[in-house]
Amino acid sequence: MRDQFFFPLTVAVGVGMFLLALQPFADRPPTGPVSGGGRNAQDITVSGTELHRFLPGDAGGLDIVDTPEGDILRITRLATQVYDNPRSGPHLVLAADVEFAMQERPIEVVIEARSAGEFAASQFQADFLARPGEESGWQTFDLTSEFKPYAFTYTTPTRGDVEGYDYLGVRPVTPDKRRTFEVRSVRIHVVGERGG
């Protein structure tokens, strides 16, 4: 093959392989902190592919289950995984704009969940953490085998001088072995006026 054809062909093949490696048409689920960008930062719902925003922490296991109704988050925890900090287990990170929009306001956290799996959890817990020492504490809910909304309210503290993240941790109650439950959606929204 002549040089005038070989080198342009080599460059074209190299560029093609580079573009394929980037997977420009791949379906990439969203990741990272939940932001109010493009929506109301005082009323955030995480469901479907946005459940990929959940982080596993150091304890517990996360799986996204693809169902005909959409993605569902499956959370498993071993009885030996003991922790108090919501960031240590499966959790959502809320971006600084959401923290600012919700500061000093009563908020409601609604988690649509059900028990699931071979060792189905009969209860789960949720904790909203604004910063260490400023959290809702672990709220406990009784699960059923059907999806049902579970809610609690919490008044967020003043943001202070430093912008940061808020966190929502969720975990199954694990009396022995391991336990599993599923989450279909999480909604966090303001339900009152600032300082009210």
Image (cartoon, rainbow, N blue to C red):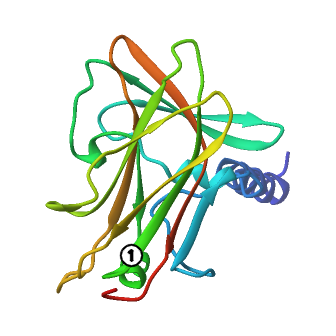
Q: Residue at x 28, y 58 (%)?
A: 136
Quarter of the image for the C terminus: give it.
Answer: bottom left
In the orientation shown, which residue stands out farthest toward the left? 133
Q: Along the horizontal axis of the image, is 164 left or right of 111?
A: left
Q: Amino acid at mark 1?
A: Pro
Q: Residue at x 58, y 82 (%)?
A: 40
Q: Is residue 29 visible?
A: no
Camera-nearest residue between 173 and 19:
173
Find disc 1 in the rendering and name its residue: 106
Q: Along the horizontal axis of the image, is 94 left or right of 48?
A: left
Residue 116 position within the rendered picture, expressed as x and y whole percent measured from the top left: 60, 24
Query: What secondary structure is marked by label 1?
Result: strand
Quarter of the image for the N terminus: give it.
Answer: top right
Q: Is residue 12 visible?
A: yes
Residue 92 position within the rendered picture, expressed as x and y whole percent measured from the top left: 43, 54
Camera-nearest residue between 165 and 195:
195
Residue 89 position within the rendered picture, expressed as x and y whole percent measured from the top left: 33, 39
Q: Quadrant of residue 11?
A: bottom right
Q: What is the crowding at mark 1: few (fewer than 14 residues within 10 Å), some, or many (at least 20)? A: some
Q: Residue at x 17, y 86 (%)?
A: 161
Q: Quadrant of residue 102?
A: bottom left
Decide: is 47 above or below 161.
above
Q: Along the horizontal axis of the image, is 45 left or right of 6?
A: left
Decide: is 180 above or below 51.
above
Decide: is 149 above or below 65.
below
Q: Along the horizontal axis of the image, is 151 left or right of 130?
A: right
Residue 16 position within the rendered picture, expressed as x and y whole percent measured from the top left: 76, 53
Camera-nearest residue between 105 and 59:
105
